[in-house]
Amino acid sequence: MKLERGIQELSICCLYYFSFIDSSLLQSVTACCLSHDLDPSLLFRFLEVISSAFAAGHIQIADYISFLITLLSRYQVSSETGSLSVEICEKSNSGFFRSVTSVVCSCLHQIGDDHLVFKMLEKAVIDQISNKLSLENTCALLRMIITVDSKPTKLCEQSIFKLGNVLPGYLINVVSVSMF
């Protein structure tokens, strides 16, 4: 993390050439992606290289999906609400996080059949949402589910029950933030 940017990018690119990226290495990569010291543009490079490594068969699907879920559930968004000043907007990284969420959702489409991806994602994502994450993280995880399943009837009964416990508070947060 303390190396110059060019060397960091080269190091990220080298990940593609590993014949197999196991879960422990992917956990380290995830920690780098979540670090406050990482240049934000390098996060997109990480996503690109990890996605390419997955497509080449260097990462198991469960590890890849876990990486994507962890990234969206643990990324710390520093959005300042209640003010629209330029200074506050510059300190906020919520727009950047929305871009990261879009890239992650496009990665989901590249995995394969949406129905099968949904079946792999459903429990893990709903469990993360049940942890009552921040508004931005919850929104990103809901977007993951919607990306692979826009028909809520495909959610299992247990998932609907868990979401029923979380969504009222989430919706109240959305309304209170949008009022400012």
Image (cartoon, grey):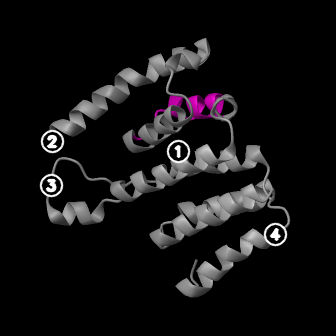
Say whether residue 132 is left or right of residue 68: left
- Residue 85 image offset from top left, x and y in percent: 14, 60
Identify the residue shown where x is 63% and y is 59%: 30
Residue placed under numbered mark 3 in the picture: 84
Residue placed under numbered mark 4 in the picture: 18
Q: CA distance from mark 1 to mark 2?
A: 25 Å
Above or below, 35 against 152 in this view is below
Say whether residue 85 is left or right of residue 91: left
**Magenta extent:** 121-134
**SS category of the residue bearing label 2:** loop
**SS category of the residue bearing label 4:** loop
Q: CA distance from mark 2 to mark 3?
A: 9 Å
Which numbered disc, 3 or 4, marks the residue that appears first in the sequence?
Answer: 4
**SS category of the residue bearing label 1:** helix
- Do callouts 3 and 4 mark residues in contact (Cβ within 8 Å)? no
Which numbered disc, 1 or 4, marks the residue that appears first in the sequence?
Answer: 4
Q: CA distance from mark 3 to mark 1?
A: 26 Å
Q: CA distance from mark 4 to mark 2?
A: 48 Å
Q: Residues within 10 Å of mark 3 (few under 14, many from 20)?
A: few
Q: CA distance from mark 3 to mark 4?
A: 45 Å
Residue placed under numbered mark 2 in the picture: 180
Residue placed under numbered mark 1 in the picture: 73
Above or below, 177 against 21 in this view is above
Amino acid under disc 4: Phe
Instruction: Please tell me which residue lies in front, 34 or 139.
Output: 139
Q: Is residue 123 magenta?
A: yes
Which numbered disc, 1 or 2, marks the residue that appears first in the sequence?
Answer: 1
Mark 1 or 4, closer to the camera = 4
